[in-house]
Image (cartoon, helix red, strand yellow):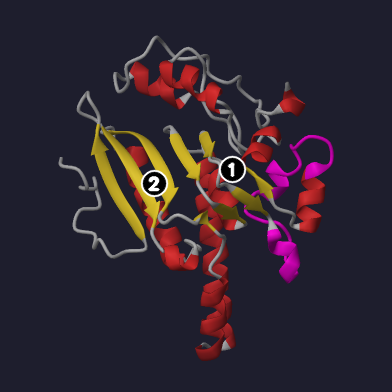
Amino acid sequence: MSQGQIPGLRGLPMSEPVRIETHPTADGRYIGMLTLDSPASLNALSLEMIQLLQGALTRWEQDPAIVCVLLQGAGEKAFCAGGDIRSFYYRKQEASHSELFGYARDFFLQEYRLDHHIHCYGKPLVCVADGICMGGGIGLFAGAAFRVVTEKSLFAMPEVTIGLYPDVGASWFLSRMPGRLGLWLGLTGARFNGADAIGLGLAEPRHSLAPVLAGTAPVPGRGLCRRADPLGQLRAQGGLRGRGAGPAHRQGQIPPLAGPANG
């Protein structure tokens, strides 16, 4: 399989708003790469993008040739600025009330299912929030096994400014931030940077990733699902080389986000 071919998704046009690629590893497996590719809209999520992400993640989760997935955004400004609100506005000009309701229902239902899938994903998923990451963008970011920030990362849950509540799993990750900072962020829509995200437990410090990738520490547990160590599972199947996997998370416990409040 050459670079750019997509297991189970061959023939997909390259003009899609999500670039779906694979890159070979040294041992003959593949890394799946998903790139939100709508930089003019700051990679705001449309229903089509959600469906493309879900389709690729589902296929790759079942494909033994794919050992991990990287999720990122195109352009220099944003990973993902949230849901594509403009698409709702333009549809309102043309669609009937029932059609608009159906579109909104499908959008949010499929978006929330995608976020849940990322929380429960059975393979290592690395998400890089380089630039703006707000609203629905944090929904994609928060459930990843490895959450990487840069000096340009800028986060917020700004839904309150348009009369909505923080969704996309925010009641999970905001409530697990130190003190009452999550409540404050949800009520104000205040912005915070990558260093803040690490302190709040929403992203991993750089030095904590190397031991996990080297196999000397377990994959950080988080999210809405019980999850065993996916790197350990892959090593047991011969998919990754390393010095052994960390212990699987204890049955029946949902581990909290890593961060200062959790030790």
The relative height of residue 16 versus residue 70 in the rendered view (above or below) is below
Residue 112 got which mark?
none
SS class of the residue under badge 1?
A: helix
Tell me the kind of residue under disc 2: Leu
Residue 142 got which mark?
1
Separation (CA) of disc 1 from disc 2: 16 Å
Whether residue 102 is visible, yes or no, is: no
Q: Residue furthest front?
A: 151
Residue in the picture at 60% in, 36% down: 203
Q: Are marks 1 and 2 in contact (CB under 8 Å)?
A: no
| Residue at mark 2 | 57
Sequence-first disc among 1 and 2: 2
The relative height of residue 160 versus residue 10 in the rendered view (above or below) is below
Tell me the kind of residue under disc 1: Ala
Q: Where's residue 11, x and y in %? A: 19, 58
SS class of the residue under badge 2?
A: helix
Nearer to us in this view, 228 or 84: 84
Magenta part of the chain? 158-181
Q: Where's residue 78, x and y in %? A: 50, 55
Residue in the picture at 63% in, 50% down: 155
Residue in the picture at 49% in, 62% down: 42
The quarter holding residue 93 reads bottom right
Q: Where's residue 196, x and y in %? A: 68, 39
Q: Nearer the viewer, mark 1 or mark 2?
A: 1
Magenta stretch encompasses residue 135? no
Residues packed near mark 1 inside 10 Å, few (<14), some (14 to 19) or many (20 plus): many
Left or right, residue 182 beside residue 256: right
Q: Quadrant of the C terminus?
A: top right
Magenta stretch encompasses residue 172? yes
Left or right, residue 24 beside residue 113: left
Q: Residue furthest top?
A: 243
